[in-house]
Image: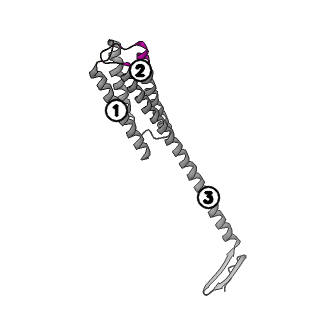
Amino acid sequence: MATSGRRVVADFGTWGPVELKISIGEIANAVAIVATGFWVAHVIERRQASQRAIKNLIVVLCRECLDHLGSLSQIIESECPASQEVSVMARNKITRCLQRFSNSIHSIEVASSKAGLSKALSLDALKTHRESLRTQITDPLAQGPGLDPATIRQIEGTITQGREAVIDLEISLHQQ
């Protein structure tokens, strides 16, 4: 048995050709490795929790977007009878709902940008549907008394496409 000049803290004896001795330096190394492992795990967990929180926020904003599209569809159905005059109150409801939908898209855009996800999450389709809805609804209401049946069908189709764009956005988010 050769001694390496290290101070032995624990001597577990010899088992055949294996001599088991632990020094203070080896204990310090083990403690440092374990502490580093816990620190790295903590940092990774905090980062993952932060990413989960950001994704959850964007999911909530997407749900709001879907809610506003649903509300818009209900308002169009209940307050805009085909080829009849639309009341001022209904026009205001529609305008507010369009604005809330637009604000939701803007909030999603801001959140994804601040989270560094703006390249991964494309909002182009959603913005296109927003502008289509704005044109399909506000132009006829500004030019005439109401919405004709063809325009109402067009609006409902665009609302459906907007919902699909939100769903695609959420799926893209969960694939990140």
Q: Which residue is pictured at 41% across the width and 12% down the height? A: 88
**What label sits on residue 110 in the rendered view?**
none
Nearest the viewer among 126 and 81 is: 81
Asked if residue 12 lies left or right of residue 64, the reply is right
In reply to whether residue 49 is colored magenta, the answer given is: no
* Residue 120 seen in this snapshot: no
**Identity of the residue furthest to the left in this view:** 150
> Which residue is label 3 attached to?
38
> Which residue is label 1 attached to?
160
Q: Start and end of the magenta stretch? A: 79-95
Mark 3, Cα crowd under 10 Å, few <14 / some 14-19 / many 20+, is few
- Secondary structure at numbered mark 1: helix
Q: Amino acid at mark 1?
A: Thr
Q: Position of residue 90 (x, y in %)?
A: 41, 17
Nearest the viewer among 162 and 76 is: 76
> Which residue is label 2 attached to?
94
C-alpha distance separating marks 3 and 1:
48 Å
Q: Position of residue 123 (x, y in %)?
A: 39, 35
Q: Position of residue 174 (x, y in %)?
A: 43, 45
Q: Which residue is pictured at 60% across the width and 86% down the height? A: 17
C-alpha distance separating marks 3 and 2:
54 Å
Q: Amino acid at mark 3?
A: Phe
Q: Quadrant of residue 122?
A: top left
- In primary-sequence order, the first of circles 3 and 1 is 3
